[in-house]
Amino acid sequence: MKTYTVSQLAQLAGVSVRTLHHYDEIGLLKPAYTGENRYRHYGEEELMRLQQILIHRELDIPLDEIRAILDAPGFDRIETLARQRARLEEQSRRYAQMVKTIDRTIAKLKGGCAMTAADLYSGVVSPEKQAEYDAWLVEKYGPEMEDQLAVSREAMSDQSASGMAARMTELKEIEEALAEGLRHGVPPQAAALEPAIAHHRDWIAASWGRDCTPQAYAGLADIYEHPDFKARFEAIEPGFADYLTTAMRSWASRQAG
């Protein structure tokens, strides 16, 4: 049987000798045998157990829990590996999405693209957290919001990657046009902003996949008070978050009047 000394195993597994000594001391990973020279020797079974230890550690499981798992009666290494593989696959998909989100954020900060609040947390916010956010909207605006969310998700999912990129570019241009009003001292209630505001409302309607009434547009301004949205708008121009919501409400009020 081929065996490895503690230093050989440490190098092979990418851990320190001190770590392996600690694992031995707490009964987590005992050597196959200890030679007369007091050198520890590890065989194939110990290598497989160490692999399980390291995988569990990567999954943030404490050492005492790992020992209990590995020493439990009926421990099935193949079944455990299969569960770990499924869990890591799910994490890898999330990490891949996180990388895309980070790339989009870098591009946004460099002025390359616009992002919605949902884009900002895509892959970072778990599906459970997204469900909480949707639930918050339903609680705030009533059960009919669930149908609206479903329509919006369907409208967005029907778009190709190139189509979505074009939509985001269009949104960036709309927001920049409105931000220019702020930069030039145009009051948010001014009629001069109406073309840009109307364009923004039309963009929202297309994203929702339904009409955006003045009442719904004013309601959207309420949602834009959320810190996630405010942070995105302030990144475009300091003061733009309040400027945009005031302009939206003013436009909606004039339409209703």
Image (cartoon, helix red, strand yellow):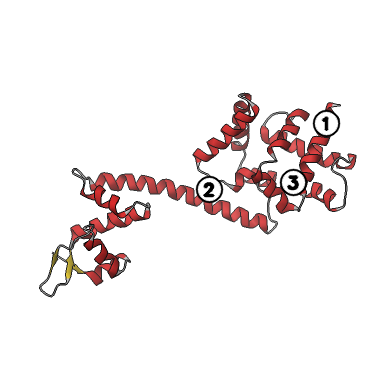
Query: Split into 4 quadrants, where in the image is the N terminus?
Result: bottom left
Q: Determine whether label 2 and label 3 are within 8 Å by CB.
A: no
Residue 50 vs 120, above or below: the answer is below
User: What numbered label is drawn on residue 241?
Assistant: 3
Residue 82 picture location, percent across and down:
31, 45
Which residue does the numbered mark 1 point to in the structure image? 253
Amino acid type of disc 1? Ser
Q: CA distance from mark 2 to mark 3?
A: 23 Å
> Residue 213: x, y in percent?
76, 28
Residue drawn at (67%, 44%) of the image: 229
Mark 2: amino acid: Val
Q: Residue at x 76, y 53 (%)?
A: 237
Whole-number angstrom distance, CA of label 3 to CA of label 1: 18 Å
Q: Is residue 205 above or below residue 227?
A: above
Q: What amino acid type is highlighted by mark number 3?
A: Ala
Q: Could you say whether the residue bearing mark 2 is in a helix, strand or loop?
A: loop
Tell whether 117 sits left or right of 50: right
Disc 3 vs disc 1: Cβ atoms closer than 8 Å?
no
Q: Which mark is residue 124?
A: 2
Disc with the residue nearer the chain's start (3 vs 1)? 3
Give the residue at the far right of this rendering: 191
Dot 2 or dot 1, earlier in sequence = 2
Q: Residues within 10 Å of mark 3 (few under 14, many from 20)?
A: many
Percent from the top left, x then y, of residue 112? 68, 55
Local secondary structure at mark 1? helix
Badge nearest the viewer, 2 or 3: 3
Between 128 and 163, which is closer to the camera in this rendering? 128
Residue 64: x and y in percent read 28, 52
- Check if mark 2's residue and mark 1's residue have beta carbons within 8 Å: no
Any part of residue 82 in sight: yes
> Image point 53% across, 48% down: which residue?
124
Q: Which residue sits at x=68%, y=49%?
A: 232
